[in-house]
Amino acid sequence: MRRAGGWHRRLFAPGSAALAFAAFFLPFVPFALALAPLLYAAWSGRASLRAGAMAGFMLWPAIASATGLVGVGMDPGLAWAGAAGIVVALSLLAAGVGILPVTLALLALPVFPASPLLPLAALLPGAGFAGLIVTALALTGAEATRSPRVRTVLSSGIAATLAAWNILPAVPSGEVTPLWREIPEPVMVTERARWIALRESLPAGGTASLGENIFRAEDADARAFWCRAARDRSLTLLIGVSEPYEGARRSTLWRLDPETCARFGDDAVLYRARFGIPGLTGTWARMPGERHPPSHDPGFDVLICLEAFLPWAWAALSGDAEPARPVVVLSNDGAFGPVFGPEFGPVFRAVPGPLPVPVLRRKAARAMAGLSGRQVHHAETGRTALLLSTPAGPITKGQSQ
């Protein structure tokens, strides 16, 4: 195989980073385009290209992760050093053992949020999680083949199969799904003013899903505020609440309506996140998946924040219920402030704000939900809420779109 010229190698890493940025953060660019440098590098057989492609792919998730960790109070030096170390380490591993083996090895860390399996899922609508893993294994075999000619034949066959798969008719997303309508949250100076404006924007008797970590479980005043809203306006509120868990703050989804508010019991909990940021919103492994009582089945499945980026969270979800159920993703991106902390001085404080993480989350969630033909909806604290166009109360499969 003809070796790439020196200028190709020098430009490959920055070119990969630029392509990854577009695929991750520009809404009109296909998410799967982020795979192009990775697959080309895997096909080339060159260690330098594999390292450059992996570095370009991991750069932006690393920056976003470090930004968020600084935003929740982690030491900036530690956060940025850790992000840089992860990018370098994964690039060196990809150079040594291959891109696809590293991708599969990352599954051993269930909370790793930047797997190349995410954009690969965008090419496999309806294939299911098993189809995603089979495709990754096939690509791993092609990359491991020593003969350039055989590697080209295998890679071409896989590419043709993926192209044919995407030409097939789209997989139906289910007979009936609740009709969630996304509405913008009011922009206010204070949190309480935003709550009041949001409450007043909800129609009486309606059902709304709000974002992640609206208040802490131990904040009785906040719970009282939203319970008054539920009682006074006959609302059913599906609201993100932060609960203490093994030294961390686990994200949950509560149902607040006149009935659950009157009992003030634990049966208000619909879902507790199974995966979170270790030490902050979760542990290194999967947490117990306590969820709603059967009588309060909301008719949809839930993922919270980081879970939208985790293949294992989607895999766990796929075995829970029929594919017709939509997925609601709760998130709170308040931690994504300026890229550098205030201790770096006024010059760095002037650096523009965060990467558009909500765009990346929506792309990742849409790709993973598409594996089983599901619809996905987003409730983002401070940005968007979801309104159900059906009467309040338990949501059942029989409700029409």
Image: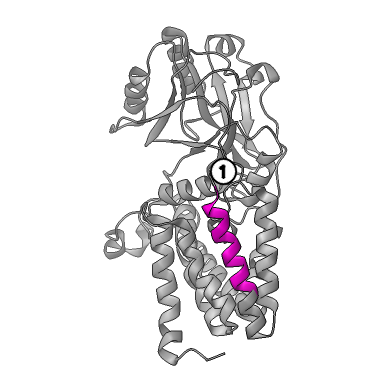
State the SS at label 1: helix
Horizontally, residue 313 falls left or right of residue 228, namely right
Residue at image mark 1: 369
At 57% across and 75% down in the image, what residue appears? 91
- The residue at the point 58 percent across, 45 percent down is 307
Quarter assignment of residue 18: bottom left
Image spot of residue 266 (x, y percent): 65, 20
Q: Taking 145 as reference, is 29 above or below it? A: above
Q: Quadrant of the N terminus?
A: bottom right
In terms of secondary structure, what is the magenta stretch mainly?
A: helix
Asked whether, in this view, residue 125 is left or right of residue 352, the answer is: right
- Front in this rendered view, residue 323 or 339: 323
Residue 112: x and y in percent read 61, 57
Q: Residues within 10 Å of mark 1 (few under 14, many from 20)?
A: many
Q: Amino acid at mark 1?
A: Ala
Query: Over which residues does the magenta segment extend?
Result: 154-168
Q: Is residue 275 visible?
A: yes
Could you say where residue 87 lies in the image, as x and y percent from the top left?
A: 53, 70
**Which colour assignment does the render follow?**
one colour
Q: Is residue 261 magenta?
A: no
Does any portion of residue 72 appear in the rendered image? no
**Residue 165 colored magenta?**
yes
- Seen from the viewer's position, the closer of residues 116 and 77 is 116
Work out whether 63 lies above or below 38. above
